[in-house]
Amino acid sequence: MMRLIKAGLMYGNLFEVNSAALVERYNRALKHLTGKETKLTEFHIDISGFAPEIGDELNDDLYLNPNGCNRQFILLSTKQKTAPLLNAKFSTSREILKSFILENETQLFALTTRDAVAGELVNSVYSVADPARLFNIRQVEIEADTTENHLVDAKVLLGKIDRFQTEPDAWWDDVLIADMIELAKKSGDIMRNPISLKTASFRQDNFYTEHFGGIYIFRDVPLPAAITVGDAKALGKLPIEHVLDFADRNGISKFLADNALAESVVAASNLNAASLLRQRLDFILVDTAALRGEDLTGMDRVALRRAARQHLAELPDEFHALSDLLRYVENNGEWPRITSEHPAFFYTLRASQTKDRDLVNMLLAELSPKDVRQLFICHKEAFYRTYLTWPEAKKAFVVDFLAREYSVDKADARAALFGPEPGMEDVAPPPPPAPTVAADMIRRVGPWGAIRRNQ
């Protein structure tokens, strides 16, 4: 993994804690939340305040995420908003934290100039001992304050100020006045500079969780379902009608179609389908060549094509099907029949532009793991797990590619692949399509239907 770290593809963009004052504030917050402290004088933290170095020191990568359920956080600076979230157990956690920081940026900036802000993402369960408990999670609320309780003190002070201004004898209440003076020493002039954070509450209807081998839960769609990476039967009875697993490719295809969650890369707007297909073919070539012991150092597209000819018999079905689709796109070739059972099927899709776009792309990335760029962008934890299984030649090639082609312009690369970034605002789910036509089309050619080129 050191190759990834040196290339900035792992533990990148963390916030550096390298001053005695920041370390002291962090330790106060850490002790407040966990009862522990760090002896380190320098470390790096993610958006939640988790530091990999402290995780190693404490031998606990979940020291801010007990039971992997209610994520705790430590904010030393609003600059943490651009940092990643490491060891995420829920796909929504980073966006929730980022939205909280953005909505309260001015107040948090003021508070973190003198203290750390510590808090927790609180949902309705405290552990997920069995898969069914995941479905009790509907809403996540953020509770936060400084380690010196500035927000609580400010709220108490506001109450006393109200009493002072409305009660007829308050002017003569020496105890009330003394309390106000002491609280004001801690919270400052809250009449001129109010200290409060907007109530943060976030719905969590559709999300991915790392628990139980990985489960995608879709409840806020016309036809809800849970999709599990492993065997669906191993999860037992779940409180949702449809439970699919990765072995049920036709079921997943139908789910995506019935909820209008995915579209063909050929029909997608704002997408250069030919370029995307060529890139995916290159990644499959790299995978095949690396498995055959080829030296991939400095290998360009011409060299990859040469390798393809040498290993033609070993190239997987995904390569041949995507080549047929590329010929259709570029040369008006025949429309290839790629059913949902074909291993190339999910390589031909991307998420539709809905509020669940990123979650669906995360699912598609895990279903088409040979596209290492999409896997890295959409599902980093799955990328890191898969990376460990690759030959050294493939590791070196992919790291070099991502460092050169993706990291230099992440925003444009994401926009080119997936369309404009969705907002956090609620978007009404799409209506389900007419069942008879859609079901028949899915059985024959997949959820995107037969696409004909205009002559």
Image: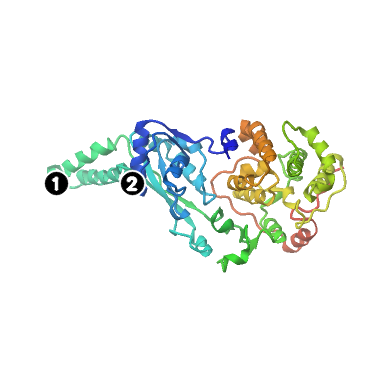
Relative horizontal placement of residue 281, taking residue 408 as reference (left or right): right
**Residue in the picture at 49% in, 58% down:** 138
- Residue 391 position, x and y percent, is 68, 43
**Residue in the picture at 69% in, 60% down:** 247
- Residue 173 position, x and y percent, is 13, 45
Between 68 and 169, the one nearer to me in the picture? 68
Mark 2 secondary-structure assignment: helix
For residue 197, what is the image quadrant?
top left
Relative horizontal placement of residue 64, taking residue 331 as reference (left or right): left
Q: Is residue 345 above or below residue 422?
A: below
User: Tag 1: residue type?
Assistant: Asp
* Pointer 2 residue: 32
* Pointer 1 residue: 169
Mark 1 secondary-structure assignment: loop
**Residue in the picture at 29% in, 38% down:** 190
For residue 431, what is the image quadrant?
bottom right
- Residue 178 position, x and y percent, is 16, 41
Within 10 angstroms of label 2, few (less than 14), some, or many (20 or more) residues?
some
Between 100 and 344, the one nearer to me in the picture? 344
What distance separates the C-alpha of mark 2 from that of mark 1?
39 Å
Q: How many numbered marks have been drawn onto this rendered protein structure?
A: 2
**Residue in the picture at 83% in, 39% down:** 330
User: Tag 2: residue type?
Assistant: His
Q: Residue pushed farthest bottom?
A: 237
Relative horizontal placement of residue 131, taking residue 252 as reference (left or right): left
Q: Quadrant of the C terminus?
A: top right
Q: Is residue 93 above or below residue 433?
A: above
- Residue 264 position, x and y percent, is 74, 48
Q: Is residue 408 visible?
A: yes
Q: Is residue 453 visible?
A: no
